[in-house]
Amino acid sequence: MGRLTARRFDEDMRLVQQLTLVGATVGAGLMAGLFAAFAYAVMPALRGADDRTFVDAMQRINVTIVNGWFLLAFLGTPVLAALAAVLAWRGAVRPALPWIVAGLALYLVTFVVTVAVNVPLNDALAAAGSADLGAERERFESAWVTWNVVRAVASTAGFGALCWALVLAGRASG
């Protein structure tokens, strides 16, 4: 009975390890895709818009994007990646650990840039009046675009690291 229980526990832990790593990887991929889409499609499209249209569009995007789905991926990804790292360290998928840690670290770069740079820029744009939209746009656009590219690159690299961790975890699990 004790052996059966221990074996069942090991199997359950492997499943939890796999699910947390898959969840972290999916979340990282979703965030990488979002930031990349802004870098290669949304912001270039808005570049040609007049100041009023640009400011209005960004204000609307910044209000709309703060929703449960975004927050689940944005906040859940580092939690799942950290849990996956702890479980890999203690379990059978230890060869994947350096890649999980790399993916987590790169995602945390994305997280910090978002919280420390992009969100304050969004907040400043939200508070902008209609007096001088050109000046508001000038203060916002270049910095936001630059730091969004940093987020896109870091989150894409983190996604890649977590994808490789999945490969290694699969090999280690047999």
Image: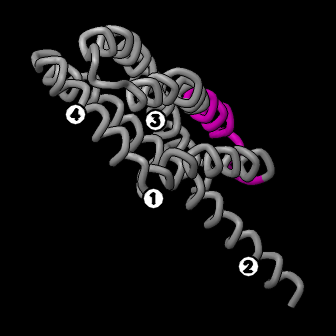
Taking the spot 61% from the left edge, 31% from the top edge, the residue there is 108
Quickly name the residue at label 1: 68
The outermost residue toward the front is 131
Earlier sequence position, callout 3 versus callout 4: 4
Mark 3–mark 2 CB contact (< 8 Å):
no
- The type of residue carrying mark 3 is Phe
- The type of residue carrying mark 4 is Ala
Which of the 4 image quadrants contains residue 135?
Answer: top left
Give, as a single range, the part of the protein colored magenta: 91-106
Task: Please check the rendered image and state whether residue 105 is part of the magenta-colored stretch, yes or no.
Answer: yes
Q: Which mark is residue 159?
A: 3
Magenta segment main secondary structure: helix
Circle nearer the viewer, 3 or 1: 1
Q: CA distance from mark 1 to mark 4?
A: 21 Å
Quickly name the residue at label 2: 8
Earlier sequence position, callout 3 versus callout 1: 1
Where does residue 92 sit, x and y in percent of width and height? 71, 53
Earlier sequence position, callout 4 versus callout 2: 2
142 and 38: which one is in front? 142
